[in-house]
Amino acid sequence: MKLVVAIVQDRDTDLVVETLNARSLRVTRVATSGGFLGQGNATLLIGVDDAQTPLVLDLLRKACHRRNMFVPMAAGITDTAYGLHSQIEVEVGGATVFVFNVEHFEQV
Ligand code: 2BA
């Protein structure tokens, strides 16, 4: 068994969860935020049989999109006096995925 931990953008989360549930794949969503941009994202915990792991990764690839965002050059600065010229473009997503081997699983 594997535990897939996927960090996805808020905007993609509903579609990912619906897609997984439609395949009878179970998922827990945790509200998180990125350490760099400080924006809300979701961390999904997906426990699956080994054989289903490629399917989960494929569904994540299809449902999570790359987006370009502009952020102030000094992270954390939100003053509107900073114009676009002092912003940098950052590509976010699709999903950041970690796959762990599960040593033991049970529901009691
Ligand atoms: P954030 O930490 O808010 O990062 C958002 C985006 O900012 C990243 O997109 C990346 O393009 C950029 N970025 C992050 N740290 C940077 C840095 N030190 N210098 C320059 N650019 C930087 P993604 O790579 O797609 O990551 C999206 C979100 O996934 C991250 O949000 C974070 O919540 C999570 N994440 C990404 N890599 C991770 C890792 N190795 N461990 C834990 N969480 C991770």
Image (cartoon, grey):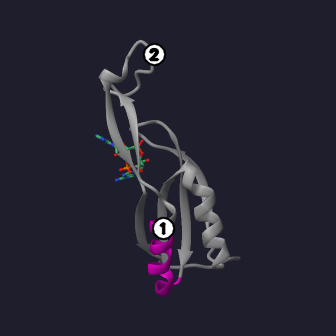
Instruction: Say which element carries label 2.
Output: loop
Residue to which mark 2 is pinned: 80
The image quarter in which residue 72 lies: top left
CB of residue at label 1: within 8 Å of ligand 1? no
Q: Main secondary structure of the magenta part?
A: helix
Instruction: Say which element carries label 1.
Output: helix
Provide residue 32's location: percent of width, then percent of height: 54, 46
Left or right, 77 with respect to 40, comes to: left
Q: Residue at x 42, y 40 (%)?
A: 35
Q: Residues within 10 Å of mark 2 (few under 14, many from 20)?
A: few
Q: Which residue reaches farthest right?
A: 108
Provide residue 63's location: percent of width, then percent of height: 52, 63
Residue 96 in view of the camera: yes
Q: Residue at x 36, y 23 (%)?
A: 84
In this rendering, the answer to whether 101 lies above or below 63 is below
Left or right, 64 with respect to 28, comes to: left
CB of residue at label 2: within 8 Å of ligand 1? no
Q: Point out the stretch of residues depicted in magenta.
A: 49-61
Residue to which mark 1 is pinned: 62
Amino acid type of the residue that numbered disc 2 sits on in the rendered structure: Thr
Q: Which residue reaches farthest bottom?
A: 51
